[in-house]
């Protein structure tokens, strides 16, 4: 009996070791597959935890450098960076994938890279890419979405003629009511912006040289123009009065002031012309962005 009990105990011990080893092996085997990391990363991405998702995607590249779908993993990292607002990092991952031999990956990478350029205000690149995507897009809805992004990019580049033509094309019966309504409002904003005339430094600066304050008057800054004229005229008169009375101290001081104000008014006209031109379309762009953000576009859901 005692020998039988010892044998049974020994067999139980053997079965326990087998069970333990199989459990450990299963755990090791589970985490030796890239799909385990990818499933976890996808779950994090679905819940909006983008940066933890990026960490898990990078684990796949670290532990499985020869993984056959590593390009898709890089694409997911780039997409997560885009959604998280880190556009420079997104570009570094997405740009190499635009030359992928796989059609689907190449298309999706160009799609998200174009969106990244747009959100990062790199409108030259976004206009180019969206134009290319529109030419190869399948489906009317997706093509219209790409043309919309291109039109808004052209608007931000002050290419009002091209933008206007694109907005006119979008105002078509083939598009939905939401798109047509946006196209009409965008066309109106585009026309208003196109009618604005930038100020020229070749006019404001010579006017300031010829007559103090005239450059600012040209810019519409009549109050600055008036103050400039009064200060320069006043200090100039006091300098003249000093010369008339042979008071060289008075003449020198006020001549210096008059010369300084005169030179300063010329530089001010130059600087203000540039500032006004730089902010000339700011309100138009804000209005365009407000209308654009109301649209429901599908290209950002391309994956």
Image (cartoon, helix red, strand yellow):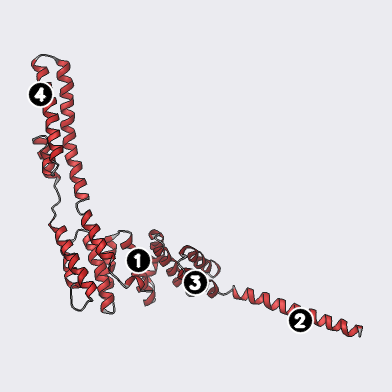
Q: Please give the residue where the numbered disc 2 appears in the rendered image.
A: 15
Residue toward you, 254 or 230: 230
Mark 3 or 1, which is nearer the eye?
3
Element at label 4: helix
Q: In the rendered structure, which disc, 4 or 1, sits on the residue that comes first in sequence?
A: 1
N-terminal of the pair, mark 4 or mark 2, is 2
Identified at 23% across, 58% down, the residue is 285
> At 38% from the left edge and 60% from the top edge, which residue is drawn?
87
Badge 2 density bin: few <14, some 14–19, many ≥20, Cα 10 Å: few
Q: CA distance from mark 2 to mark 3?
A: 37 Å
Q: Residue at the far top: name it.
A: 246
Horizontal and vertical percent position of residue 239: 12, 21
Label 4 belongs to which residue? Answer: 237
Which residue: 34% across, 63% down?
A: 116
229 and 185: which is toward the camera? 185
The numbered mark, 3 or 1, whose residue comes first in the sequence reads: 3
User: How far is mark 4 from mark 2, CA to CA?
Assistant: 112 Å
Residue 234 appears in view: yes
Where does the image place residue 191, in percent across and percent down from the top left?
14, 61
Residue corresponding to mark 1: 113
Callout 3: 10 Å neighbours few (<14), some, many (20+)?
some
Q: Which residue is mark 3?
A: 43
């Amino acid at each position: 009996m005692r020998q039988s009990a010892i044998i049974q105990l020994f067999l139980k011990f053997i079965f326990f070791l087998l069970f333990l080893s199989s459990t450990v092996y299963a755990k090791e085997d589970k985490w030796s597959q890239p799909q385990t990391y990818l499933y976890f990363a996808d779950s994090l991405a679905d819940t909006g935890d983008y940066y933890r998702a990026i960490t898990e995607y990078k684990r796949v590249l670290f532990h499985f450098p020869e993984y056959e779908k590593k390009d898709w993993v890089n694409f997911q990292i780039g997409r997560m960076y885009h959604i998280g607002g880190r556009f420079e990092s997104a570009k570094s991952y997405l740009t190499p994938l635009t030359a992928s031999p796989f059609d689907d990956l190449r298309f999706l990478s160009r799609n998200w890279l174009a969106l990244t350029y747009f959100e990062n205000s790199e409108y030259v690149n976004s206009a180019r890419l969206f134009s290319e995507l529109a030419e190869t897009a399948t489906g009317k809805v997706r093509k219209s979405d790409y043309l919309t992004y291109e039109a808004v990019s052209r608007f931000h580049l002050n290419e009002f003629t091209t933008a206007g033509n694109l907005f006119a094309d979008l105002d078509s019966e083939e598009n939905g009511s939401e798109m047509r309504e946006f196209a009409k409002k965008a066309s109106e904003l585009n026309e208003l912006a196109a009618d604005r005339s930038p100020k020229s430094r070749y006019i404001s600066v010579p006017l300031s040289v010829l007559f103090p304050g005239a450059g600012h008057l040209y810019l519409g800054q009549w109050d600055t123009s008036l103050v400039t004229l009064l200060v320069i005229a006043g200090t100039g008169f006091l300098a003249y009065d000093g010369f008339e009375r042979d008071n060289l101290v008075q003449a020198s001081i006020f001549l210096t002031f008059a010369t300084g104000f005169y030179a300063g008014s010329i530089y001010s006209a130059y600087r203000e012309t540039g500032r006004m031109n730089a902010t000339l379309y700011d309100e138009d762009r804000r209005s365009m962005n407000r209308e654009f953000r109301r649209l429901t576009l599908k290209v950002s859901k391309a994956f």
